[in-house]
Image (spheres, rainbow, N blue to C red):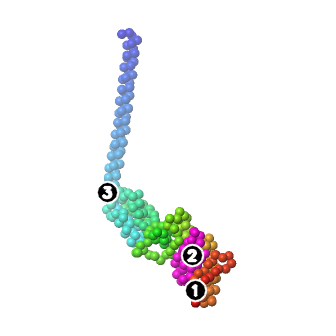
Amino acid sequence: MSRRNRIRRRSDHSRVLNFLNGFGKGALSIAGVLGAIGLLSAFFLSLYQFALLSPLLRLEIVQVEGADPVLERELMAMGKLHSGLSLAAIQLGKLKLDMEDHPWVRRIQIERRFPHTLVISVEKQEPVAIVVLNQTHFMNRYGELFKRVTAVDPVNFPVITGIPADSPDLPTLLPRVVEILNTLKAEQPPWAVNHLAEIHLKDGSALTLYYTHMKARIECASDTLAQAIRKLRQVTSFIQEKGELERLKSINLNYTEGAVASFERS
């Protein structure tokens, strides 16, 4: 074998040894990192297990804000909350979703206050009207339908009729109804919203109002409602002075000058 070949073989052998040596060191480094990760994972797992079992983080107080006693009991039952649970083990996201399934809850916020307290803040649904579609639903002040009306529910709210159940304009019609209710809320009795029995909508802007203190229907437009109520006060005052209020069947306020009233035959 020539001297040149011997030198080349020696060089190849050296490169192989260097590669194996470097690979071995790299493998040892990787093994060290993996070992450290394993130890760290085991430490955090042990810490988590300690948190789950430790009496130092046991749930002792559930503070419910914004709910009446009945709703509070129902939410506690839905969340299966009881003393003895680990505060660290409670899944806040799932608990929030479960509680927001309650028909009288609009929104829930939940906060842990270590070491022993869970705070549940409830935004309760507040109905402002009952909307008649294919079924009757409560509507809140945001124009959202949130619950079907049942026999045990309170029903002393204005009833909204005339909206087709399949109307594509429903998402805009309901907030418009809220605006109408807010306008009437600012009025003085007997034309305030708490004396209102029904609002019937026609074509989204024409209104027929029915009040609890009189049998006559009132025709007006939603975009001129405040002005129409002022005119209504004047017209009904005049009719009452004439002693004809009991015979009044309807008042149409959709006229620039005055109004048109119709009466039952005496």
Three-letter code, disc 3: Ser
**What residue does disc 3 label?**
54
Determine which of the numbered discs, if any, sits on residue 216 in the image.
none
SS of the residue under disc 2 = strand
Q: CA distance from mark 3 to mark 2?
A: 65 Å
| Magenta span dominant secondary structure | strand
SS of the residue under disc 3 = loop
Q: Quadrant of residue 13?
A: top left
Give the residue displayed 37% in from the left and 13% down from the top: 6
Three-letter code, disc 1: Glu
Establish if 263 lies above or below 15: below
**Which is nearer the N-term, disc 1 or disc 3?**
3
Three-letter code, disc 2: Thr
Q: Are marks 1 and 2 in contact (CB under 8 Å)?
A: no
Which contiguous range is marked in magenta? 194-220
**Which is nearer the N-term, disc 1 or disc 2?**
2
**What residue does disc 2 label?**
208
Image spot of residue 41 (x, y percent): 35, 45
Q: Are marks 1 and 3 in contact (CB under 8 Å)?
A: no
